[in-house]
Amino acid sequence: MKKMGRPLKSTTNLSHGVKVRLDDETFARLCQYCDNTGKERATVLREGLLKYLDEKEHDK
């Protein structure tokens, strides 16, 4: 029998995985932010990437 993965929390289809490497300071800041807000690291990274891309598109 296949092992089941953890179900997604939202109804959004998140079907693409991306690996990112962070230096120690950036990772520590990310973890601290997640602890303070209760958000998951993946959620924070998605939100940050979307904000960055929106700003870059607006600058064009």
Image (cartoon, rainbow, N blue to C red):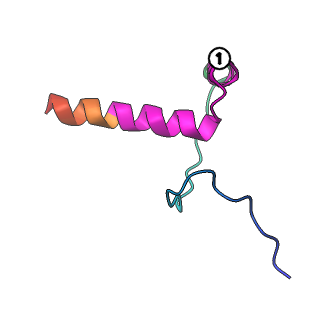
Q: Residue furthest bottom?
A: 1
At x 81% / y 78%, what residue is drawn? 2
The residue range painted magenta reads 27-52
Residue 21 visible somewhere in the drawing: no
**Horizontal relation, residue 6 to residue 17: left or right:** right
Q: Quick one: 59 or 7, which is closer to the camera?
A: 7
- On screen, residue 24 above or below 45: above
**Horizontal relation, residue 3 to residue 12: left or right:** right
At x 26% / y 29%, what residue is drawn? 55
Q: Categorize mark 1 by other alpha carbons within 10 Å: few (<14), some (14-19), many (20+).
A: few
Q: Is residue 3 magenta?
A: no
Q: Residue furthest right?
A: 1
At x 62% / y 20%, what residue is drawn? 33
**Quadrant of image for the N terminus:** bottom right
Label 1 element class: helix
- On screen, residue 10 above or below 26: below
Q: Is residue 29 magenta?
A: yes
**Horizontal relation, residue 14 to residue 55: left or right:** right
Please state which amino acid type lies under the numbered disc 1.
Answer: Glu
- Residue 32 quadrant: top right
**Horizontal relation, residue 24 to residue 11: left or right:** right
What residue does disc 1 label? Answer: 25
Residue 26 visible somewhere in the drawing: yes
Q: Main secondary structure of the magenta part?
A: helix
**Quadrant of image for the C terminus:** top left
- Residue 51 quadrant: top left
